[in-house]
Image (tube, rainbow, N blue to C red):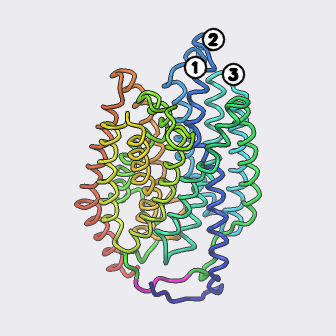
Amino acid sequence: MAVTATVSDHAVASNATRWTQLVSCVVCMIMIANLQYGWTLFVNPMKEAHPTWGFDFLSWHWDTLSAITLAFTIFIALETWLTPIQGWFVDVLGPQRGPKLMVAIGGILVGLGWVINSIADSLALLYLGAIVGGAGGGGVYATSVGQAVKWFPDRRGLAVGLTAAGYGAGAVLTVIPIQYVIRSFDYQTAFLWFGLLQGAVVFVLAFLLRGPEPGEVPVVAAPKVIQSTRSYTPGEVLTSPVFWLLYLMFVMVSGSGLMATAQVAPIARDFGVEKVVLFFGATTLTVALIVDGVCNGFARPLFGWISDNIGRENTMAIAFTLGAASYWLLGAFGSVPLAFVTFAAAIFLTWGEIFSLFPSTCTDTFGPKFATVNLSLLYTAKGTSAFFPTVASLIKEYTGSWQAVFVVATVLNLIVVALALFVLRPLRQRVIAQGKAAGQ
């Protein structure tokens, strides 16, 4: 893709500078990945470690999946719903101070959240840990994605995909270590050790971060995907039908994916494959978690790169059609160990890319100047979808199986395919054309 440089107050930054910023953000995302993707390793140990009785009404049902899953729901909600405020602070404080300050505070909160989990003796304290960790993780996530879209307008899908891949695949590095600590000590120790390590690394890396100054990034001469020639303010974005359509689509796909990511271990147990040895002494669940993480991470730069070349909506249609098939196949054949690993991996491969496709689509449509806060507004859709895992647990407890959950996920993905092709694409083309006609 050809690019031409422009200079205002600053010279165009070197590729080394841009990639240093991107790599730092990717590592930060790896460090917060366990907050979401490592959670499933703690669910069953927590459920087994606590009785059904207690003096605090919030600790009364520690042995129920839905009560423990609510902590995950709270984490996702706080991780997303606070990001517009956090993104606004990053943009307002400016490129030199905003990213550093937000990520440093995020690192402290990330570590503190898991420390609280390690000492939680009631659901109330467990939920507090979810709140603190969610606030910290959201600040790190929003800042890192904002950095990617700002530093790489010429490779936006790929850059966001690589950043999001750190979050999606980062937990792969610690699946076996966390399982070892839980088995050798207890889940509380795992929360404590990994919480302190993850928070410390994020805090240190924060001081390497800065945003691009005006004129530091290359200008795309002839992008293969349509991009806005103006930057819309958050207020304008919130009044745009395109934003709310993206929001609805994000909720539908994210909700179906969160049902799987939060409950891989319980699903494996109910299918009877959790402890079945598959390869070289590794159980089906262990293999699935590692492969799922790899696929989840790989999907983000892969589909981001594809969307840079064939368009965002076309890529959405391909990914979510494959996702719908994956949910159905897991529900139908998940009781076979190898099939469980294969189709669970396919779900992660065709779900994780929403965290590169939707941010890229948003910035293409609404411009880069207010990208951090605008992306954060869209990212709250993940918080809205955070209730899906709890609802899925209740459906499973009511029906006695996961089949209805997989059917719902399949239908949601197919609806989003239709919306991408027949509603989103013409709406986005109209908004971008209007901006060009106005000379902005």
Are the residues at dot 1 and dot 2 in contact (C-beta closer than 8 Å)? Answer: yes
* Few, some or many residues within 10 Å of mark 1 (<14, 14–19, 20+): many
* Few, some or many residues within 10 Å of mark 2 (<14, 14–19, 20+): few
Q: Which one is earlier in the sequence, the residue at label 1 or at label 3?
A: 1
Q: Which mark is residue 51?
A: none
Dominant SS type (magenta): loop
> Is residue 5 shown left or right of residue 20?
left
Q: Which mark is residue 62?
A: 1
Residue 292 on image: x %, y %: 49, 48
Q: Gap between marks 1 and 3, in whole Å?
A: 10 Å
Q: Which one is earlier in the sequence, the residue at label 2 or at label 3?
A: 2
What segment carries the magenta color? Answer: 218-222
Above or below 395: residue 415: below
Write down the residue under mark 3.
121
| Residue located farthest toward the front when viewing the structure as drawn | 280
Q: Gap between marks 2 and 3, in whole Å?
A: 10 Å
Write down the residue under mark 2.
54
Amino acid at dot 3: Asp
Residue 383 on image: x %, y %: 48, 43
Amino acid at dot 2: Gly
Q: Gap between marks 1 and 2, in whole Å?
A: 9 Å
